[in-house]
Image (cartoon, rainbow, N blue to C red):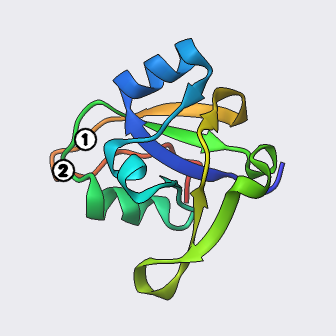
């Protein structure tokens, strides 16, 4: 597997995706026309900037090799390239998941092996 990419979604959305076999993205993803992902180095900042204090989230680790040509790396925040998926995410591309509890500071507690 190449270096994984990450997406954060609600537990409810992930539960539904596991039943249907695909994750269609959040409301923001659907509005933007692609599913937002982050690299391992970007995911903590993404959570802090956009999801601070939100309970009931799940971190998805995704194998980018399973996404084909629908995955594009595009310039976004601070001129950095971020992965964007222009298709639904197949559940089969998700290699690991974790709950993301919120700490007293409002930041999410990430697994220790995520930079």
Q: Residue 89: percent from the left, percent from the top?
A: 61, 38
Q: Residue 12: percent from the left, percent from the top?
A: 35, 22
Q: Is residue 16 above or below residue 90?
A: above
Q: Quadrant of residue 48?
A: bottom left
Q: Which residue is mark 1?
A: 102
Q: Which residue is mark 2?
A: 106
Q: Which residue, as the protein is rendered here, is positioned at the far top?
A: 19
Helix, strand or loop for disc 2: loop
Nearer-the-camera pick, 52 or 32: 32
Quarter that holds the C terminus: bottom right
Numbered label attached to residue 73? none
Image side of residue 81 versus residue 70, left or right: left
Q: Residue 51: percent from the left, percent from the top?
A: 27, 52
Q: Is residue 11 above or below residue 67?
A: above
Residue 25 seen anywhere in this rendered image of the structure: yes
Image side of residue 12 versus residue 5, left or right: left
Please report contact status of discs 1 and 2: CB closer than 8 Å, yes or no. yes
Q: Is residue 31 above or below residue 17?
A: below
Query: Is the residue marked by circle 1 packed among few (<14), some (14-19), or many (20+) residues within 10 Å?
Result: some
């Amino acid at each position: 597997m190449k270096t994984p990419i990450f997406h954060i979604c609600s537990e409810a959305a992930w539960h539904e995706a596991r039943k249907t076999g695909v994750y269609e993205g959040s409301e923001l993803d659907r509005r933007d026309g692609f599913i937002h992902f982050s690299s391992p180095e970007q995911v903590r900042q993404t959570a802090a900037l956009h999801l601070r204090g939100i309970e009931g989230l799940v971190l998805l680790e995704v194998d980018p090799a399973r996404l084909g040509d629908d995955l594009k790396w595009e310039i976004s925040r601070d001129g950095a390239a971020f992965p964007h998926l222009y298709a639904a995410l197949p559940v089969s591309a998700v290699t690991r998941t974790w709950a993301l509890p919120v700490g007293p500071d409002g930041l999410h507690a990430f697994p220790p092996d995520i930079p």
